[in-house]
Image (cartoon, grey):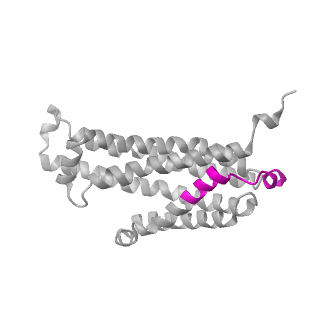
Amino acid sequence: MVDRSREFSPQTYARVAGLLYLINIVAGAVGEMFVRSSMIVSGNAATTAAHIAKSPELWRIGIAGDLIMHVTDVPLMMIFYVLFKRVNKNLALMAILFTLVQTAVAVANKMNLMLPLFLSANVEYLKVFTPDQLHALAYIAIKAHGHGFGIALIFFGFECLITGYLIFKSGFLPRALGLAIQAAGVCYLINSFALILAPAVADYLFPAILLPCFFAELSLCLWLLVKGIDVSKWQATT
C-alpha cells in the first residue's frame, strides 16, 4: 500500500510556493526596476532607443527576467489550488483561471519588448525608415507593453481579491495576509483601469499605488517560505 502522506506534504508545498513567489518577485524586479527603468527615458524616444542599441544584452536580460517571473506563475497556480481548494474549491479554481489569463496576456505582451531590438538592427530593410521614425516605433512598442501589462494586471487584481478571501477564511494562514492581498488586488485594479480610462490620474498615482501590492505579496511570500502554514488547521479544513 502506498503511504499517501509521503506523497503530499502541505507544508512542503507551502515552502515551495514561498520560494517560487520569491523568484517571481526578484525576476520581475530585475526586468522592471533595474533594466527598463534605467534605459527608458520618459517622452524621449531617441535617447531610449540609443540606450537599447548600446546595451541590447541588458534589454534582453530584462525580458528574460519577466519570462522567468511568468514561468513561476504556473506551479504557483497549482500549489495555491491544492492548498486552498479545502477552503472553497470553486473559488480556488476561479483564482487559477484569472491567473491563467493574466499570465497568457503578459507573456504574449513580451513581443512588444522584442520590437525595439528588431528596430535597432542594422539591416537593409529598415533603411526605408528614417532614424526618427524607427525611434518612434520602438517607443510606441514600449508604451504598448506598459498598457498590455496593465491589462494583464486587471485579471491578477481579481485573482488577488479571491486569493485574499481564501487566505482570510482558511484559518491556516494569518487573516492579515488575506486582507493585505485583497488590498493589493484593489490597488492593481485602480491602477490598471486608471491607465485605460484616465491616464493623467494613473500618472499621478504611479508608482505609489503599487507599493501596497509589493509589500503584501512580499509578506505572503516570506510567510510561506519561513513559516509555512498551520498544518493541523489545514487538515481540519473541509
Q: Is residue 157 above or below residue 137?
A: below
- Which residue is more in the foreground, 91 or 62? 62
Where does residue 40 sit, x and y in percent of width and height? 27, 54
Where does residue 212 sit, x and y in percent of width and height? 51, 66
- Which residue is more in the foreground, 92 or 3? 3
- 17 left or right of 188 in image: right
User: Could you tell me which residue is drawn at 40 percent across and 46 percent down?
Assistant: 109
Q: Is residue 222 magenta?
A: yes
Where does residue 187 sit, x and y in percent of width and height? 51, 67
Q: How many marks?
A: 0
The image quadrant that residue 186 belongs to is bottom right
User: Could you tell me which residue is drawn at 59 percent across and 54 percent down?
Assistant: 222
Magenta part mainly helix, strand or loop?
Answer: helix
User: Could you tell me which residue is drawn at 59 percent across and 62 percent down?
Assistant: 181
- 223 left or right of 47 in image: right
Q: Is residue 68 magenta?
A: no
Q: Which residues are magenta?
A: 218-238
Tell me the quarter of the image containing the N terminus. Answer: top right
